[in-house]
Image (tube, grey):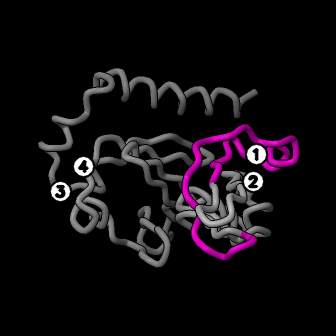
C-alpha cells in the first residue's frame, strides 16, 4: 500500500504527516499513524502502522514491515525457524532456515533466495542489515552484497568491533536468560 484511497471519493489521498495512535490503534501495537487527506473532498484518512500480526491478517493492509511480520508468524506457525531482517536503508523481510540446505534463505514478497535483489535490481546503497530470530541477532549484511568494499565505506554509524561485540552480548544475554 502506497497511499490510502479516500473512503468517500475513492481517489488517492495525499500525505499529511504523522499523527498519534488512538487507544484502539495502540492496542494492536501501532507505534505511529500516517495521516492522509483527500485532495478532492478534504476527508482525512489514517494508516496505522500495526505490528500485531493478528490485526495485520484482519486488515490485510500494509507495506514491507507489516507483510514481514505476517510472513514470520505464518512460517513460525508451520514450524520453520525464521529471522526478521532489517535493512537500515528502509526495508524489512524474513529469512527462513532450510533444514535440507542447512542455510538461511531470503524471503521477501514473492521473491525467495535472491540475496542480491536490493543491491543489483533496486540499486540500494546498503549499510547495515541485521537479522533477528528467537535465538540470536546477527549482522547479515555481507550475505546481501557483492560490493563489500563499497558497503564497508558506508558503514560509519559505529565501529565494526563495537557492532560485533554488541550483537554478541545480545546473544550471550539470551543464553544466560535461558539458563535461569
Within 10 Å of the Cα at label 2, are there few (<14), some (14-19), or many (20+) other Cα atoms? Answer: some
* Mark closer to the chain start, 1 or 4: 1
Task: Determine which of the numbered discs, if any, sits on residue 66 in the image.
Answer: none
Residue 131 visible? The answer is yes
- Tell me which residue sits at (50%, 64%) in the image: 97
Q: Which residue is mark 4?
A: 125
Residue 116 horizontal/vertical position (percent): 27, 64
Spatial CA distance of label 2 from label 4 is 30 Å
* Mark closer to the chain start, 3 or 1: 1
* Mark closer to the chain start, 2 or 4: 2
Q: In this rendering, is residue 104 above or below 31?
A: below
Q: Magenta stretch?
A: 7-36
Task: Determine which of the numbered discs, if any, sits on residue 29 in the image.
Answer: 1
- Tell me which residue sits at (74%, 70%) in the image: 7
| CB-based contact (under 8 Å), mark 3 and mark 1 | no
| CB-based contact (under 8 Å), mark 2 and mark 1 | yes
Spatial CA distance of label 2 from label 1 is 6 Å
Spatial CA distance of label 3 from label 4 is 12 Å
Task: Determine which of the numbered discs, if any, sits on residue 52 in the image.
Answer: 2
- Tell me which residue sits at (53%, 64%) in the image: 2
* Mark closer to the chain start, 2 or 1: 1
Within 10 Å of the Cα at label 4, are there few (<14), some (14-19), or many (20+) other Cα atoms? Answer: some
Residue 72 horizontal/vertical position (percent): 62, 62
* Mark closer to the chain start, 3 or 2: 2
Q: Nearer the viewer, mark 3 or mark 2?
A: 2
Within 10 Å of the Cα at label 1, are there few (<14), some (14-19), or many (20+) other Cα atoms? Answer: some
Please tell me in which quadrant of the rendered image residue 83 appears.
Answer: bottom right
* Mark closer to the chain start, 3 or 4: 4
Task: Determine which of the numbered discs, if any, sits on residue 146 in the image.
Answer: 3
In front of the other: 73 or 56: 56
In front of the other: 48 or 142: 48
Amino acid at each position: 500500500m502506497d497511499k490510502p484511497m479516500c473512503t468517500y471519493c475513492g481517489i488517492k489521498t495525499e500525505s499529511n504527516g504523522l499523527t498519534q495512535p488512538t487507544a484502539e490503534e495502540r492496542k494492536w501495537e501501532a507505534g505511529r499513524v500516517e495521516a492522509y487527506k483527500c485532495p478532492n473532498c478534504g476527508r482525512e484518512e489514517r494508516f496505522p502502522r500495526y505490528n500485531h500480526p493478528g490485526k495485520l491478517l484482519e486488515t490485510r493492509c500494509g507495506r514491507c514491515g507489516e507483510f514481514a511480520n505476517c510472513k514470520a508468524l505464518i512460517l513460525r506457525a508451520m514450524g520453520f525457524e525464521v529471522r526478521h531482517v532489517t535493512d537500515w536503508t528502509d526495508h524489512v523481510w524474513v529469512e527462513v532456515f532450510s533444514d535440507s540446505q542447512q542455510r538461511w534463505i531470503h524471503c521477501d514478497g514473492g521473491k525467495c533466495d535472491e540475496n542480491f535483489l536490493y543491491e543489483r535490481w533496486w540499486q540500494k546503497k546498503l549499510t547495515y542489515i541485521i537479522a533477528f530470530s528467537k535465538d540470536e541477532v546477527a549482522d547479515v549484511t555481507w550475505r546481501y552484497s557483492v560490493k563489500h568494499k563499497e558497503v564497508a565505506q558506508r558503514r560509519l554509524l559505529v565501529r565494526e568491533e563495537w557492532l560485533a561485540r554488541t550483537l554478541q552480548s545480545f546473544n550471550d544475554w539470551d543464553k544466560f536468560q535461558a539458563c535461569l
